[in-house]
Image (cartoon, grey):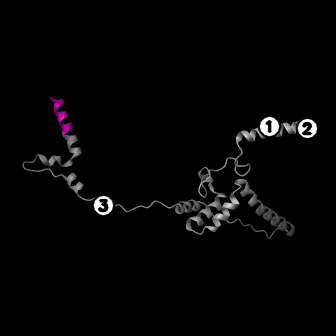
Amino acid sequence: MPPVRSTIFVALALAACQNPDVSQGDKPGAKAPTKVAEKAAEPAPKQPEVKPPTQAELLRTKIDRFVRSPLTTDVTALPPAEKAALDKLIEAARLMDPIFDRQSWAGNAALRAELEKDTSELGIVKLDYFTVMRGPWDRQEHYAPFATTLAHPPGAGFYPEDLSADAFRNGSRIIRRTRRRSRA
């Protein structure tokens, strides 16, 4: 009857796995300790209370992913005319910043002014991230809003926010027809 013995052995092995103290129960007068019951009676150790991060902490973490890198170069070897030209290029680039902001979203200037007035911790961090992202939407997170409740407009600041795709296509057709007529 080897199959029966192996079945009994397997059953005992399974019982031992579930309760390792079963093996002590076969001694005469021995009582199997119940560690499981003892553990259940003890109060569980208190876990330290973990507070979820605040919105300001989350935004600060996102800001910290970016590193400020000053752009410098030695221009002492440039002739005066080239230095003057470089100064004009830098001046032109600074004039283009508000244009880029307007193209990103028409409300950027007004929202920036509003954020500059907010001196709370969250307001300061929102303004910092607004500056990094050049607007109220997180470009790293598929334009998720962080400083506004508005969804990112499909046309950004290039087209009116209420312009539908159909109206845009119809307007494009009218413009093409007008151009064809004027060429003829």
Q: Quadrant of the C terminus?
A: top right
CA distance separating discs 3 and 1: 72 Å
Circles 3, 1 touching at the beta carbon (< 8 Å): no
Of callouts 2 and 1, which one flags the residue occurring earlier in the amino acid sequence?
Answer: 1
* Residue 84 image label: none
Q: Is residue 142 above or below residue 110?
A: above
Percent across and percent down for residue 52 are 46, 59
Of residues 145 and 82, the one nearer the viewer is 145
Kindly identify the residue that appears in the image at 72 percent across and 39 percent down.
166
Percent across and percent down for residue 110 are 69, 61
Q: Looking at numbered disc 2 in the image, what kind of residue is underneath it? A: Arg
- Start-end of magenta stretch: 1-11
Q: Which residue is mark 3?
A: 45
Q: Looking at numbered disc 1 in the image, what kind of residue is underneath it? A: Arg
Circles 2, 1 touching at the beta carbon (< 8 Å): no
Q: Looking at numbered disc 3 in the image, what kind of residue is underneath it? A: Pro
Q: Which residue is mark 1?
A: 173
